[in-house]
Image: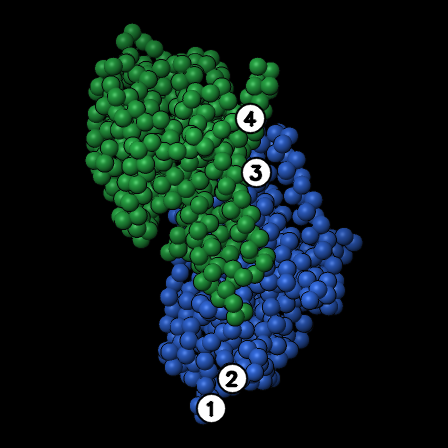
Amino acid sequence: MNEEEIAFRNEVRQFIKENLTAKLRRAGTNMTSVFADYDCALEWHKILHRKGWSAPEWPEEHGGTGWSPNKQYIFQRELKLANAPALMALGIQMLGPILMHYGTEQQKSDYLPRILSGEDIWCQGYSEPGAGSDLASLSTRAERDGDDYVVNGSKIWTSFAHRANKIFCLVRTATEGRPQAGISFLLADMNLTGITISEITGLDGTVEQCQVFFNDVRIPSANLVGEENEGWGVAKYLLEFERGGHNYSNDHQKLLAKVRDISGEQFSNNGLLYKDDPFFVSKLAELEIDALALEITEQRIKSSDNPGALTSVAKLVGTELGQKITELSVDALGAYIAPLQSEALEIDYAGTVIGPSNAVTTSAEYINMRASTIYGGSAEIQRNIIARAVLGLR
Amino acid sequence: MSLDSNQKLTDEQQMLSDMVSKYLSETYDFDSRRKIANGPVSVAPPHWKQFAEMGWLAMPFDESDGGFNGGPKEISILFEAFGKHLVLEPYLETILLGGGALSFGPEDIRRQYLPAIIAGDLQCAFAHHEPNHTAERYYVGTTALQSKDSWQLNGVKSIVSNAPHSGLLVLTARIKGRKHDSDGIGLFVVDKNVRGVHCDDYLTIDGRRASEITLNEVEVERGALLTVDAGQLDTLLDRACFAVCAEAVGAMSALISMTIDYCQQRKQFGQSIGSFQALQHRMVDMYIASELSHSLLIATTNAIANASDDRHRLLAALKFRVDRSAREISYGAIQMHGGIAMTDEFKVGHYFKRLTVISKQFGNANFQLERYRHYNVHNNHS
């Protein structure tokens, strides 16, 4: 880091010290997936927005910061290490860049400021029960009727649809030609007549995912992003942001810190603390080396104008390494993987915790981490992309 | 080593196997199980009395104690089926650990408790783990002090499975020596309702119930000490370890069948996803991992049945292999099912959670590696 970057880091730290309340910090600490407590995430979003820091990577003309990639990286890392809760990311990281690229002036001025301020929280209607990895086979229909589209069908794995007020979705507007050819990109209010939501309880006992049903939902045609039947190109642009927009190495630093914490509290089968157990520390070092290599890869992506396929590498390595680190956490956690302590993850929980201080989050995190190689383009899809786009294999 | 002759089931074993499969297939549906698993803590899994009526609870006990003299083969038949059907009933805690420990006790103790246990009227929990030391087999900081005609117990026990529904606790407490010593550990039977026993109850991720237990000046009579023989403690823990390995083998085979079925039905890109070579190879690897575990289970079953010198080494190899296979198979099953496997409504994730808990019970992978090396050296020199 140069002097300017050090000064910047100190400024960020000072801001965090003054604004990240104990409650918000707890929301960050208690995260067991990519989502934090919803209300805390919104509260933190608004605090960051007042400072002008809610979407640092956006261009300055839309309310971003104009920071260098290094500064953005420093910013994200400081937030993560301070246990700031993650923001609801879909508006800032995905829809924002899409609207800047494909949106009409009206759409930009309607939506971008409200994404920035946190007034609108967006969820993503992509996957369907019959269209997962094969996203282009989606069948939710949108038929033009006057100035509206009439939408029928259902979307699944829609994160936080039960809390978000807006949804962007891919719908089928034509059935001729390649499946990719008849897809359009639509924006909608979640309170429209005909939209119903069914919550899905996850393996950790909490609700993050939903299925969203559309029954004759009328969406104004002004909410079409890009051209009709050209939504696939919009989605592909967006998927690149979904994969490349996230710094996995920041997550890994936090996960590795957790392994170290647990290894200083729990004893190995040989009677040594895990942190003094040569077998364990050498496994930890192996993972740290992978984390370092990924961190540098992510910096390469950040400083590249055209990240391309390296984003798939980062997504793949980032998620699979996250799984390996939580697996090592669980090795140290031992039998304390078992207690189900969902209530201890609530923000106002004041009771005791069974096992080491990190047991509550580690157990749920290990389970939830299995989803990370499924969502946002599964590990298999990422490998296909790398094989075709990078290695040129057909 | 010839396995064929030993793999054949006797008529009685075949009957047991058929009966267990039939009963669980017909009655142990996943939705009912899920309701129990999700709590509240006070609700117990409902099949226990039927298990008793079918004679399963008597299986491992000596005939003189009202049992059927069942050996490792019978245990593995039961537990493979329990694993396949994700059975929540506390056979491990009540019969193998609690009942097993009581079998080491004097006749009056056995007469007092075993009939009620075998009848399904009394449940047990085995309180051994202590805070922060759950990976160590012999770590016991709980103390037992002897006075004229009683023992006083003091200490803390962690993650005591089935304690919320148990009338009896079988617990380890140190009579002499230092906290890590294998010698000097007493196995005590304690009525859970006596003064000084405090339990905090909770659910576990695999749908069971457990407690954190504090023992504060708990007074028990002299006869409450079942044994101080370190060999008997090992026997007890090894039998439990063997049982959960069999359970894991059952769970893994269920996961593999479900994954194969799903991949054949699920269509993406205009074809069943099971037609993709990358997924086929992953399923093949899962199958291989399962078969390797199965092989070691068969060999260990025979070694225990024949009291072979090699049984300790084989058991360590089995548990280690089960741990590795369980991970590979759970991860693969979830990945190939996709999002649905991450939901509470779907069975796959529940196998994963149960297998994860098993992998940390009765010796984690490193413990098994060390034990394997220990017995390997031992066997090579003999």
What is the CA distance from the residue labelled 1 to the residue labelled 4? Answer: 73 Å
What is the CA distance from the residue labelled 3 to the residue labelled 4? Answer: 29 Å
Q: Chain of mark 3?
A: A
Count neighbours of disc 4 (C-alpha within 10 A) and say few if under 14, some if 14 to 19, many if 20 or more. Answer: many
Q: Residue furthest front?
A: B5
- Give the x, y percent position of residue A129: 44, 67
Q: Nearer the viewer, mark 1 or mark 4?
A: 4
**Which one is earlier in the sequence, the residue at label 2 or at label 1?**
1
Identity, as a three-letter code, of the amino acid under mark 4? Tyr
Count neighbours of disc 2 (C-alpha within 10 A) and say few if under 14, some if 14 to 19, many if 20 or more. Answer: some
Callouts 3 and 4 on one subunit: no
B27 left or right of A134? left
> Which label sits on residue A147?
1
Callouts 2 and 1 on one subunit: yes
Which residue in the protein does label 3 denote? Answer: A261
Identity, as a three-letter code, of the amino acid under mark 3? Asp
> Which label sits on residue B372?
4
Examine the rendered structure and indicate whether residue A296 appears above or below residue B222.
below
Quadrant assignment for the C terminus of chain B: top right
Identity, as a three-letter code, of the amino acid under mark 2? Ala
The reply to whether dot 3 and dot 4 touch (C-beta < 8 Å) is no
Q: Which chain is blue?
A: A
Residue visible at 39% across and 52% down in the picture? B347
Residue visible at 64% across and 78% down in the picture? A101
The reply to whether dot 3 and dot 1 touch (C-beta < 8 Å) is no
